[in-house]
Amino acid sequence: MRAEARPPRLRWPWVVLVVILIAATVAGALWFSSQNPGGSAQPIGEPANSPPPFAAEPTGCLVPGQDLQMLLATQKQAPHTTTGAVEFSAALLRWLYQYPNPTAKDSAVAQPKVVASTSPFDLVETFSGNPNTSNSLVPNDTDFYLTTTISKYLVESYTDGSASVTVNGVVHVNGALNPQLVIATTYALIWEQNAWRVVSSSRPEPGRLASVGKAFTGGC
């Protein structure tokens, strides 16, 4: 991560191009900060803590949709388990990566609800410039969203109070699925005020989910 003199702000996706067989799979990560007061994502490698068995396999679509109501409903329903951490991560990925972007009003509502109190995330500032969150995988001002129907996840580490989860989503451009475009992020989460909240994000190792990730049982 980069060190900065000024307090960190949310940063936009890092996109890594990975050639796999006949498909060019693009993996990206939305960098929210360059410093993480109160915690940081686990390095992608050997997990610091082996995750417990899943009580129920994650669907990737606990609540359908891409809007704020979907994100908040998923957070409310996501249990204090590995499954809950994965479901919240998938919902967060779907909400953050779409165009049109989340509105300033929705970002302001989401900030105190889904972002950890120790995190420097600034959702309102992030979306204020109407950015292309796909980092030009999709042309500017072009509608897109992510689907988890053919996507994967991996619990990097888990404790009773925190989790590190890598998830990806396949890009729909103007409603048409493009399997060659995949956005992936590793989220560091904490269990705070009886809900999963995000602390930071990091760039996954290219191709990691393709080789060791698990497929969602449903997706949307």
Image (tube, rainbow, N blue to C red):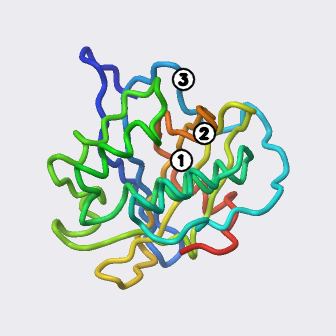
Q: Which residue is more in the foreground, 91 or 200?
A: 91
Query: Of the residues shown, which amino acid type is indicated by label 2?
Result: Ile
Q: Secondary structure at mark 3?
A: loop
In the rendered image, residue 6, in percent from the top left (x then y), is placed at 24, 17
In the rendered image, residue 124, in percent from the top left (x then y), is placed at 25, 42
Earlier sequence position, callout 1 versus callout 3: 3
Q: Which residue is more in the foreground, 11 or 122?
A: 122
Quarter of the image containing the N terminus?
Answer: top left
In the rendered image, residue 128, in percent from the top left (x then y), is placed at 17, 46
- In the image, is residue 172 above or below residue 153? below
**Residue located beneath label 3 in the image:** 39
Residue density around tag 2, few if under 14, some if 14–19, many if 20 or more, within 10 Å: some
Pointer 1 and pointer 3: residues touching (CB < 8 Å)? no
Q: Secondary structure at mark 2?
A: loop
Residue in view at x 52 percent, y 19 percent: 38
Pointer 3 and pointer 2: residues touching (CB < 8 Å)? no
**Residue located beneath label 2 in the image:** 44
**Residue located beneath label 1 in the image:** 205
Q: How many marks?
A: 3
Residue in view at x 49 percent, y 65 percent: 169
Residue sitting farthest toward the top: 5
Query: Of the residues shown, which amino acid type is indicated by label 3?
Result: Gly
Residue density around tag 1, few if under 14, some if 14–19, many if 20 or more, within 10 Å: some
